[in-house]
Amino acid sequence: MPPQATPRCVDAAALIVPLRPALIAFFLRRCGDPAEAEDLAQDVILRALTHSQWASAEQARSYIFRIAINCWRDRGRRKLTHGTVVDCSEQTPGLAEEKSPERVLSGRQELERIVSALRELGQRTREIFVLYRLENMKQADIAQLMGISVSAVGQHLARALAHLARRMDNDGSGR
């Protein structure tokens, strides 16, 4: 009697190893932090290894990137529900000076205007601006990360800065 054919299963490790750089790039584009991107990719790999029987490589890739999307959404929900810890020791510069309620309100309003102006930018322009200004990435590194030229990064930055300048010149009176 011939042996029964068993369904062919894709080797999880053989599939995940080549997908690891793509997972890291996926998360790096979203968070901009290489260490966090590595951690998130590792979480996805661990989750994928627990479900290591797939009928095809395509099914496995789809499953792994679905895990990645869910992992990214989970991270966003955690950030919303878990507060950020800030060290408020007396040695922190600027905390000793008294801030009037008017000064605090003015600062909050200006921050809200900046955030609002950033939200008006296109997603790619906003991401490039945040990577450059807040994450202190070099334009060449951003270009490589985004898969665009350094001059395109410069154009996005110029567009973002011009938009922010226009919005801040409106004195908060609207668009």
Image: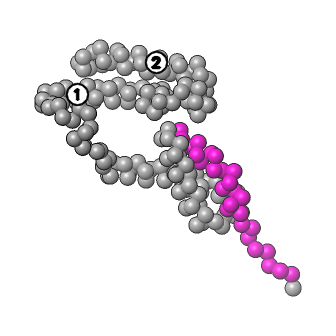
Question: Looking at the image, can residue 124 be seen?
Answer: no
In the picture, measured across the screen, residue 139 lies left or right of residue 106, that is right
Instruction: Looking at the image, tell me whether mark 1 or mark 2 is earlier in sequence order.
Output: 1
Residue 70 appears at what percent x and percent y? Answer: 49, 53
**Res 144 quadrant in image:** top right
**How many marks do you count on the picture?**
2
Which residue sits at x=59%, y=57%? 45
Tell me the quadrant of the picture where the N terminus can be found. Answer: bottom right
Where residue 33 appears, x then y in whole percent? 49, 41
Q: Please give the name of the residue rendered at 58% of the width and 30% of the height, measured from the top-left corner.
A: 141
Quadrant into which the C terminus falls: top left
Start-end of magenta stretch? 2-30
Residue at 51% in and 30% down: 137
Up/down of 51 relative to 63, above or below:
below
Q: Is residue 162 above or below residue 71?
A: above
Q: Nearer the viewer, mark 1 or mark 2?
A: 1
Residue 5 highlighted magenta (yes or no): yes
Question: Outermost residue, front direction?
Answer: 91
Q: Amino acid at mark 2?
A: Arg
Question: What label sits on residue 159 in the rendered view?
Answer: 2
Residue at which label 1 appears: 107
Q: Pointer 1: residues within 10 angstroms few (<14), some, or many (20+)?
A: few
